[in-house]
Image (cartoon, coloured by chain):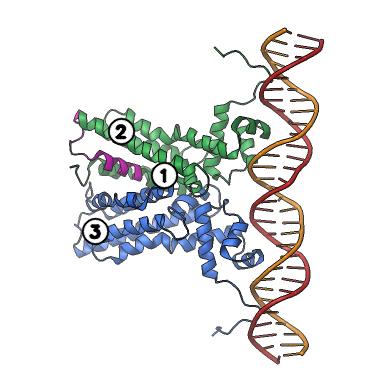
Chain colours: A blue, B green, C red, D orange
Amino acid sequence: MNNTKKAGRPKKFDRDEALLKAVEVFWKQGYEGASMKLLTDSMGINSPSLYAEFGDKHRLYLEAIDRYANDDGCAPLVALETEPDIEMAVRAFFEAAIDYSTHHASGARGCFLASCVATSAGHVDGTAEMLREAIEATDTRITARFDVEKARGALPPDFPSSDQAKLLFDLRQGLVFRARAGFSRGQLLADIDKGVAAVMNPAVKSD
Amino acid sequence: MNNTKKAGRPKKFDRDEALLKAVEVFWKQGYEGASMKLLTDSMGINSPSLYAEFGDKHRLYLEAIDRYANDDGCAPLVALETEPDIEMAVRAFFEAAIDYSTHHASGARGCFLASCVATSAGHVDGTAEMLREAIEATDTRITARFDVEKARGALPPDFPSSDQAKLLFDLRQGLVFRARAGFSRGQLLADIDKGVAAVMNPAVKSD
DNA sequence: GATGTTTTGTATTGATCGATATAAAATACG
DNA sequence: CGTATTTTATATCGATCAATACAAAACATC
């Protein structure tokens, strides 16, 4: 019902577009490394408008983390959950991770959570908690997909879903870390086969 | 020969102790998050002495990275190379990583390279290169240890040393990332058995 | 004890930090 | 057109940033 135009001067920016720009800046520079000047310039919003819209730098950061976690950050998860064949799904998970960590439009590399937010977890309020929640949610979603495949018979009944979920997660951490350090897309793609095999063939079966 | 006492007022600080304090501050706060005030206070050196000794903040940071890479950062590697039995060595590698990432005296958590330096790799000169070198050196040293065990017969001839080295490395990335996010030592230790098994039992043999 | 050398402590630099005060500009409604 | 409302743009706030100037202090050597 409240879709009538508001009174007053119209905004010059799109809130979500601006937030995505903020993600890019924080992703490249880290929290303290991203100055408000750099943020306002990149987001195309002048300082007072930014504060009116997002509160302050800290709240903008937390919102950027949340935005990322539901976009690039969970792209591998979506790929895993979308692809019907489970082995192809695991492969798609890796490919999605390599994709956003080496070819992001903004030039930002690696994983925003794994590199930048991990740093702020040491001293910026609220970030360690968000990181912990993201990790646990990812473990849970990967495990769930494996459990579905066990029920379907595509994975053996003794497949240790939770253990392999953590393994898949950790392998991604290695990939995005290497990506942040400058390893090329090609170098990272070369490791996928071994990663898929390790996840699909557990060394220890479930009891 | 040049061990005679220097002229002039003696220094009040030990260079290496001060550098270790700098590592701790950067580890907790990140590069920009570590102010010179915080650094001088923690290191017990006043500002002019610090600049005379270490150049500037950027050079201090690079030196801190190097210092860490040869201390805590390679403790798991040393453990891996020291323990005679290869399976125990892999286990010791994980335990060392969990140890420094959850119980460091300064309260810093996770891995300095994996969290903080990874952030600065996006925008601080020289850090991405140092990160890349550390990764490659680690891969090389782990691979070398596996190759030695293959020659000794403690590992099968078709053991894919390089692949399992990367796997071991990636599993550590997962551990230290979780540690930075606040997971407890106990939670991380619970995953070691599965990690050891995955490393020791490759899904794909070497050709 | 005088001299030269090096480090210390204090005080401060210009620049940049995050965050705002103020007023003009741009809309809707009457 | 006039009024109320909202966002814009400019200009700037005090605080903090990284980095230094300066002189007293503490040593070795003569």
Say what amino acid the circle numbered 1 marks: Val
**Disc nearest the viewer among 3 and 1:** 3
Say what amino acid the circle numbered 2 marks: Ala
In this view of the protein, which residue sits in the foreground, B180 or B35?
B35
Does residue B16 show up magenta in the picture? no
Cα separation, mark 2 vs mark 1, equals: 18 Å
* Chain containing mark 2: B
Quarter of the rendering containing residue A51: bottom right
Q: Circle 2 is placed at which residue position?
A: B89
Tell me, yes or no, whether the two marked residues, 2 and 1, touch with CB atoms within 8 Å. Answer: no
Cα separation, mark 2 vs mark 3, equals: 31 Å
- Residue B183 visible? The answer is no
In this view of the protein, which residue sits in the foreground, B35 or A191?
A191
Residue D4 at x, y percent in the picture: 72, 82
Does residue B157 show up magenta in the picture? yes
In the image, residue A142 above or below residue B87:
below
Say what amino acid the circle numbered 3 marks: Glu
Q: Circle 3 is placed at which residue position?
A: A87
Q: Circle 1 is placed at which residue position?
A: B176
- Mark 1 secondary-structure assignment: helix
Residue B55 at x, y percent in the picture: 60, 34
Q: Residues within 10 Å of mark 3 (few under 14, many from 20)?
A: some
Whichever of callouts 2 and 1 sits on the residue coming sooner in the sequence is: 2
Quarter in which the N terminus of chain A is drawn: bottom right
* Chain containing mark 3: A
Residue B194 at x, y percent in the picture: 28, 45
